[in-house]
Image (spheres, rainbow, N blue to C red):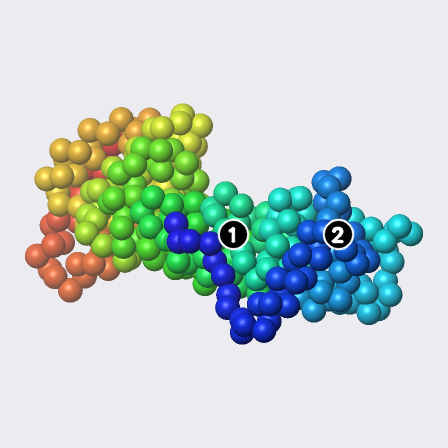
Amino acid sequence: PPPPTQTSHGQDQCVRLGQSYSLRAQRALCDVTLEAEGICFPAHKIILASASNYCKTLFVGNLTRAGSLDGTIRLKAVSAAGLRNVLNFIYSNKLDLSLQNIEETFKAAETLLVREVIKLCFHFLEGCLNCENCMDVLNIAKKLGPAELRQKAMCYIGQHYKQILADPQCLKDLDRVTLCEILDRTDTEGCSELELFRVAVSWLQHDRTRLKDAADILRRIRFPLIPLRDLQRYVQEMPLMRLDSGCHRESLLGDWLGVGRRVVSNCPAHHLYISILLLLLLSFY
């Protein structure tokens, strides 16, 4: 992963931040306390208001619903570790991010409306994409909600499909929705339809509870793009193609042949291929 994400300021501002950080460390002149998971963080209203729109509204508007008579603001949906990380950024302009702490850091920044931290979280996830962690980044992006980052992660997976899904652990942790998104993509570079079929079957066979999704998964495979010889050798002999009642002829064969007709409609020589494919698939049932 990349080093801790930081932003830069002028020298004078860095000096002021250092002084503010020192005051907070000494708990000097603190006039407000933020609390998360029972842990208290003394702070300064003026500094919080300058970085957090939530705190600015709270202090300037003199709202009290989130606070108490003792000057403590209790944040119920925020972890102590996430709040600590955001406060450290506000006071030092340094943000330590990892795949392990980014969700709780983002949640704290989202709650306090610290936009700079939110931007840095997205920038960090985008910058650390690699074959080892792209599935983690994708899952985090789904939780945090940035559609652009999710699309970039999916694109990366499509470009490195073979290497990523060759990892048994990755295949184990892959959820159905993400697998369907991968199979539906047309930019899975270097992957034949037969290889996609094998990946889908491996995913289904990993856990018997997944077999109920067999019809939905396998209908995404463009079987007419698989050479007839490979269909006979690999697909026809696959027990799963016979066992799952959900893979009925009406839904799957119509889809498979529909794709085939679109692919070869301008090539009369392939009409026989489609007819043979129909007979082959009907023999499964």
- x and y percentages locating residue 129 in the rendered image: 37, 53
Measuring 68% from the left and 51% from the top, which residue is drawn there? Answer: 25
Left-right relation of 261 to 138: left
Q: Mark 1 — residue?
A: 96
Measuring 27% from the left and 50% from the top, which residue is drawn there? Answer: 160
Q: How many marks?
A: 2
- x and y percentages locating residue 132 in the rendered image: 34, 44
- x and y percentages locating residue 240 in the rendered image: 30, 29
Point out the residue furthest to the right here. 69
Crowding near the residue tagged with mark 2, few <14, some 14–19, many ≥20 C-alpha atoms within 10 Å: some
Q: Amino acid at mark 1?
A: Asp
In this orientation, which residue lies closer to the viewer: 222 or 32? 32
Q: Is residue 180 visible?
A: no
Q: Quadrant of the C terminus?
A: top left
Of label 2 and label 1, which has the lower sequence position? 2
Helix, strand or loop under label 2: loop
Measuring 13% from the left and 48% from the top, which residue is drawn there? Answer: 273
Q: Is residue 26 visible?
A: yes
Q: Is residue 15 above or below residue 108?
A: below
In this orientation, which residue lies closer to the viewer: 255 or 227? 227
Crowding near the residue tagged with mark 1, few <14, some 14–19, many ≥20 C-alpha atoms within 10 Å: some
**Which disc is residue 250 wearing?**
none
In this orientation, which residue lies closer to the viewer: 251 or 154? 154
Measuring 20% from the left and 29% from the top, which residue is drawn there? Answer: 237
Left-right relation of 92 to 162: right
Left-right relation of 116 to 267: right
**Which disc is residue 27 wearing?**
2
Q: Amino acid at mark 2?
A: Arg
Q: Is residue 95 above or below residue 139?
A: below
Q: Are marks 2 and 1 in contact (CB under 8 Å)?
A: no
Point out the residue furthest to the left here. 269
